[in-house]
Amino acid sequence: MCIYDQLQALNIELPPVRTPAAAYAPFAQTGQLVFISGHTASKNGQPWTGKLGKTMDTAEGQQAARSVAIDLMGTLQAAVGGDLNRVKRIVKLMSLVNSTEDFTEQHLVTNGASELFAQVFGPDKGAHARSAFGVAQVPRGACVEIELIAEVE
């Protein structure tokens, strides 16, 4: 099944690239690697705020991470000239989870994004290396921020 069939089956419509909130580019390419700047979780067009272990649980954090993955795919689509079929592999995710010092399920929160990439791109192209960190704060109070590296044709 092609990537766009998968997105349709999952009822996912990719958003356009968001305007950066500061002095950076939404993506940069060098060789066959595309680096997508960190995207923060949003809900209804506003930052999805919260702190895991205090105002949010792991399941809600997973939903937020999944929403970030959808935004990342929208930016990735723009980076590859509108054709996600040019993506050879999702190489790496780095996830920052706004969490209390005793919250230890950052890796499970980030699964919300990782599992979606595997569903959309398949088990080979979608499998990736990953880091998940607990941090004291994410810009605008968002609960999750994720950046992505992809290899393209």
Image: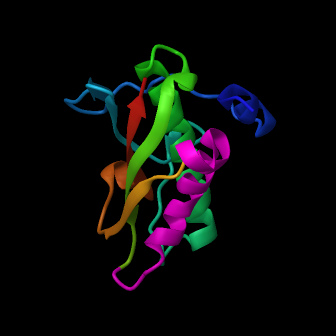
Give left or right: position of 47 versus 58.
left
Residue 81 vertical placement versus 58 (above, below): above
Of the pair 34 and 62, the residue shown nearer to us: 34
- Of residue 101 and residue 129, the one placed in the foreground of this image is 129
Image coordinates of residue 104 in percent, x first then y, are 43, 81
Which residue is rendered at x = 40% and y = 56% of the image?
Answer: 129
Q: Is residue 120 left or right of residue 133?
A: right
Q: Is residue 17 above or below residue 49?
A: above
Q: Residue furthest right?
A: 9
Where residue 58 appears, x then y in whole percent?
57, 72
Residue 144, percent from left and from top? 43, 56
Q: How is the image coloured?
A: rainbow
* 30 vs 37, nearest the viewer: 30
Q: Is residue 66 left or right of residue 105?
A: right
> In the image, is residue 119 part of the stretch drawn in magenta?
yes
The main secondary structure of the magenta stretch is helix
Q: Which stretch appears magenta?
A: 101-125
Q: How many marks?
A: 0
Position of 112 compared to 80: left or right? Answer: right
Q: Is residue 51 magenta?
A: no
Q: Residue furthest top?
A: 81
Give percent across and percent down for residue 44: 60, 40
Q: Residue at x 46, y 52 (%)?
A: 128
Instruction: Point out the residue furthest to the bottom here.
Output: 102
Q: Quadrant of residue 132?
A: bottom left
